[in-house]
Image (cartoon, coloured by chain):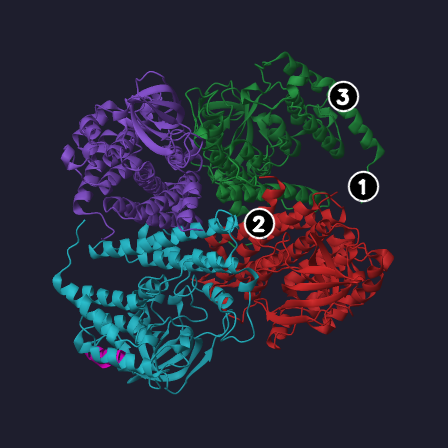
Chain colours: A cyan, B green, C purple, D red
Amino acid sequence: METKISVSLSDFRTETRAWLEANCPESMRQPVKDPFDLFWGGRNAKFNSEDQRLWFERMLEKKWVVPYWEAKYGGGGLTSDENNILTQEMTRLGCRKPLYSFGISMLGPALLNFASEDQKLHYLPQIVEGKIWWCQGYSEPNAGSDLASLQTKAIDKGDHYEITGSKVWTSYADKSDWIFCLVRTDFNATKHNGISFILIDMTSKGVSTRPIKLISGKSPFCETFFDGVKVPKENLIGNLNEGWTIAKYLLTHERQMIGGIGETDVKKEVHTTALEKLSLNSSGAISDGVLRNQISDFEMDEEIFDLTIQRVTDEAKTGNNSGALSSFFKFYGTELNIARHELLMSIGGSEALFWGENEKKDGDLARKFCRSKGNSIEGGTSEIQLNIISKLILGLPTK
Amino acid sequence: METKISVSLSDFRTETRAWLEANCPESMRQPVKDPFDLFWGGRNAKFNSEDQRLWFERMLEKKWVVPYWEAKYGGGGLTSDENNILTQEMTRLGCRKPLYSFGISMLGPALLNFASEDQKLHYLPQIVEGKIWWCQGYSEPNAGSDLASLQTKAIDKGDHYEITGSKVWTSYADKSDWIFCLVRTDFNATKHNGISFILIDMTSKGVSTRPIKLISGKSPFCETFFDGVKVPKENLIGNLNEGWTIAKYLLTHERQMIGGIGETDVKKEVHTTALEKLSLNSSGAISDGVLRNQISDFEMDEEIFDLTIQRVTDEAKTGNNSGALSSFFKFYGTELNIARHELLMSIGGSEALFWGENEKKDGDLARKFCRSKGNSIEGGTSEIQLNIISKLILGLPTK
Amino acid sequence: MALIITEEQKMLKDSATELLSAKAPISQMRELRDSKYTPFDKELWEEMVAMGWTALTVPERYNGLDFGFVGLGQILEETGRNLSKSPLISSILLGASALRLSDNEALKVKLFPGIMEGTSQLTLAIQEGKHHQTSIFNTQAILKGDKYVINGSKTMVIDGTTANLFIVACLVDENYSLFIVDAKSSGITVSKKILMDSGSYADIIFKNVEVSAENQLNIKFDGRLFLDQLMTISYSGISAELLGICKQAFDITIQYLKERQQFGVIIGTYQALQHRAVILFSEIELCKSIVLKALQAIDENDTSALKYAHLAKAKLCKTAKLVTNEAIQLHGGIGVTDDADIGFYLKRARVAQQLFGDYNYHLDQLAKIKGY
Amino acid sequence: MALIITEEQKMLKDSATELLSAKAPISQMRELRDSKYTPFDKELWEEMVAMGWTALTVPERYNGLDFGFVGLGQILEETGRNLSKSPLISSILLGASALRLSDNEALKVKLFPGIMEGTSQLTLAIQEGKHHQTSIFNTQAILKGDKYVINGSKTMVIDGTTANLFIVACLVDENYSLFIVDAKSSGITVSKKILMDSGSYADIIFKNVEVSAENQLNIKFDGRLFLDQLMTISYSGISAELLGICKQAFDITIQYLKERQQFGVIIGTYQALQHRAVILFSEIELCKSIVLKALQAIDENDTSALKYAHLAKAKLCKTAKLVTNEAIQLHGGIGVTDDADIGFYLKRARVAQQLFGDYNYHLDQLAKIKGY
């Protein structure tokens, strides 16, 4: 079969590859060992290495920190095809992202869709330049799966809102400069209709955070408390009491990320690890027959799941798409990741159980295993995804 | 460990064994090939062989057709221990039951618990003597899992009831003499409170039946229609409008039977079939490693399930029992039987797919496989059992 | 290339949906079964020929349409949906593909016309034991003069009672080879076997069956490679049919969940059933992807085509088992009656699962391909 | 014999419930972990000694209680429920059992008193690779004069950093043999490993370690049989602990389902969650039966005891994986925080699953025992 590639795209790929090879420092092409080794930007931005600084500044100058946003917002203005090529080439070379930011992946899309032009021009370029470290304030202790029952309240005080309540699962809240938040602005409306989306400076008086420790050890998650925090009214994004629309839009985004869509990591195949670690029988097969079958079944699903991402992405290009499919990807992708870690533990046997006393250095496998258990909970539990698919795709009735 | 066996029980076992060996004809000790080969009694009772007649008459004379009922009802008056010994010895020798009868397994227990003394003295001895072939009329086309919503109505006409409606899943209705039936006697009461339990002569005017064909081929099941059937009032068992109590009692009984409790067949181990039919590798293991693991996992559950029947039975003797456990046995036992047939099909490969054109002779394996799919539906679906366990054992709330 | 079907492939699929729902719905299959297990409806077969389905994968130089296996897969998916019975699998998926792969030019010129016209019906005789495998055959072909003499026995030959030509997989010395054998040749005994899907299969014994050396399908083409490529097509094609089975059994079941009432509510409102339905939906989503990929891989001569074919058959076997079992269970009592159609999906699925290797077989092959 | 526990066994179990809930609840385990992974609480150990638990399986002729393994199993089940940390597994389930099985009378007389008093702490050094197996050891003991010289290395030695005596499984020529080795012997290197359950394990290297021939546990008793019997006890005992883990993780989860509200209702009203809870309940019902049967089989010298032990460990490993995973998932967000106790059950279960062979290992052994 022939594939037609436009000449200009082909040129773009050649140029991109050459530029990346020339400009991406060798150390920025290595897999990330420690999440704290990433560059997150922010008011107190600190580069962990000279290479990291160089890479960020070069990409910023090239306008490739967020290559697909419009130029007026600080983006590179690339077309979707060009952006795909850039992503492919970065993946091929193993280039890290120059900036890790919930501003790019979550707040940005919300602003682009729901903010006023003034707000976009104000916030988006700051995101691109890495000036603000953003975190997300959605869930509350009693509003997890039932997010819309959130109780953090924003009371209208004329020129500002006064915000009181608490959020959980705010990643890096203790390091962030600003938080984008869902708050209740109307207590009389039905629960989905009284919610607004607002931006809050974390240095405001009355904001405090407390880290959450997970079963895997320390985590970037925090609880965040608001005790009568004053927030200017212009920080409201979109219409008052219509924040749920923005939330739904962002949750779909988040599900796709957690489900593995757009992930660029190349995962090591499980059977490769198995071949390194396990004994083989005389015909070269893994001696543990049960494990061999489990691995084979897992890799079957993993490979086909990746093909499914491809198929649905291709279908979306022709206009056939259902937003609820993101729930399917989130559900299935996280189940696969959990299964992967179970297998790695099985393969590793007693060795994989090592935990150690130094959280930063020891027990990588066991801690990642524990961490994976959260995948089917964060970003909407698997059960919530199943409910969504049942209703929106299968059209099964609710009582 | 020492076990104390009372001398008289030990004697009873010796005598029983001797009697069975002397009186059970050789052909009545062979496994049943064709269900139509069993003796079901009834007005038109026909013995399929001289041995079958002999065996029934000898057991009848010995009072062992229903050994555990009181003598005044035609039973043998055996104690529970004695009855267990008789069952064990019959199982050991492979003796068939002398009479197959829903009268013994289902109606009898209901009569014993809920009927008047007159009714007991009238019906029970007839059951023992195999004079009446009974069938069961519970489910209706729109009252399956939701049995209590049954609509077959019995209208009070002074000296009799007039019954109109239809029943499904009435086994052997086309061969039966009488049916025990749940009917609605009060349309104003809540659905569980307007049901009565009544006995109907199948030769009454207005009764008709139609056989139900299953995916496995012909079946003993029928649809049974009642078109203004006159039924004397004395045929009511228990109190008017309290039939649901009897139904619940009988359903528990039925579940235990379907779940395999009290089953005396000795099932051939799946791995034995596998060893006969499958190729082995050089170390004597089944070459198909996936199948080997599936068999091993299945036999693990099967063996432990049998132990669980033993444990719960033993616990019941000490007074610790929950009726809802019959739901667990029904659910788990039928799932195991379904899994067993899936494995046998896997082992048999293309050979097991043989169906043939002669229902009586061909395709035994494939037809039994198809039939097994009904196990998790008949006698209350698995889903209903799970609901019951959730509510009655786990105490989980309902909305 | 994009993992979607093209406009042309979509049109072909739509025309298949239309023809089969009109001329070969599941009621036809039921009638055929109730007419002493008639293998297929001849009129339908003529319609299929008229639609060009028999020429779909035949190269243009032999006057075929050369439309590709993605196209044939779309049709097989629809026959799976309708459980339509025809010689499409035996004569086209297997027969025409074997001929297409052959390097025996004379045989191709001779046989393609009859296959396309539907007047000649081929089938493949490969399986010998209870389970499919392609590594050991006991059937041998020995060269004597200008003829081969075939001895051995085959089983699970699809439409083996109606085909006029058998493609027989044999050992010639140590090598694999495929021969076209006339069904009427002396020394052939065909025993009809009706399987669970009401389909007609055959056990065939070959006793000193003579076949001209001109009937050897692979002349210079290595028999092992030939078989691998033919099996790649077979696995993928049967997987396409299984996909149709899964989709339709699922659709019927979802429809039932939306209609059936118990306890005063539609049973589709029960969350436990909803979640199980979504699991089925999810697995079928994966199935769609791998079936299309496997079919595309054949058309593109992808070097990983065999791996994708194994993946397809493994995943589809596993999913078909799950979906058909759940479909019956979610139907409740009506699901196990012969009156309901859903049981036919269970029965056809189990046969299609065994055809050319079950889940276990393909999972094992996948591990072997990856070297563990 | 009846598959129920006796009144005496029930009383023992109740006393264990009482002691552990009072003195070794899960909060103690958390404190030990937060105190630099302290292996166990010495005071608790003394209480256990006072309760007679260390003498439970010691024969009467050595002044033990000879109460049997069903009894020890009840206690281990309760330690599983509470995740209590103590040397019960290492020194009693493994150590005292090895000594009980030994035919070295002098050694028994010498060591039982210290074990029962809790002053001497034994453990078993058997595993060498990442996975448990009992068929190949590289650790060798070579007789030189009246001493054996041991060379090799062991891993996953439970409480290996606190035990004063190691029972080391070795090869002597071609035969298996077990030796009591003083932890302070020259040539021994112990490396502490904290595993996922916050427990303290050791990798131990034996380099020319000399041990008196009098320390050989099996004199005439065949080493293979000795190991099989010791493993029968080990598998069954760990299974009893896993049963307690499953039961408690389940109970905590059911409680949570009855309390937690979302969408204005108690989440335990959701049918999908109810059905999943019932699956867990059902599997735990099976677990109860096989654990008791396996323990009874030891006490009764049942010739099938090893089979029941494999069945127990296989089933319990599978169920513990299912139950702990579902327990976390059904808890939602709180389930993955360190604040909640439920995560500890996951972590201990995974370690106990690996100890003395995982599900895969025991399933394979079962097939082997049955000859397929």
Pinpoint residue B354: horizontal percent, then vertical percent. Answer: 43, 26
Query: What's the amino acid at mark 3?
Result: Trp
Residue located at (36% from left, 46% from top): C311
- The residue carrying mark 3 is B19
Looking at the image, residue D88 sits to the left or right of residue C322; the answer is right
Which tag, 1 or 3, sits closer to the chain's start? 1
Give the chain letter at badge 2.
Answer: D
| The quadrant where residue D161 appears | bottom right
Pinpoint residue C82: horizontal percent, then vertical percent. Answer: 29, 34
Return the mark for residue D301. none
Q: Which residues are magenta?
A: A118-130
Return the mark for residue D283. 2
Q: Residues within 10 Å of mark 3 (few under 14, many from 20)?
A: few
Labels 1 and 3 in the same subunit: yes
| The quadrant where residue A110 appears | bottom left
Pinpoint residue C2: horizontal percent, then vertical percent. Answer: 23, 53
Of helix, strand and loop, which mostly describes the magenta segment?
helix
- The residue carrying mark 1 is B3
Quick one: SS at disc 3? helix
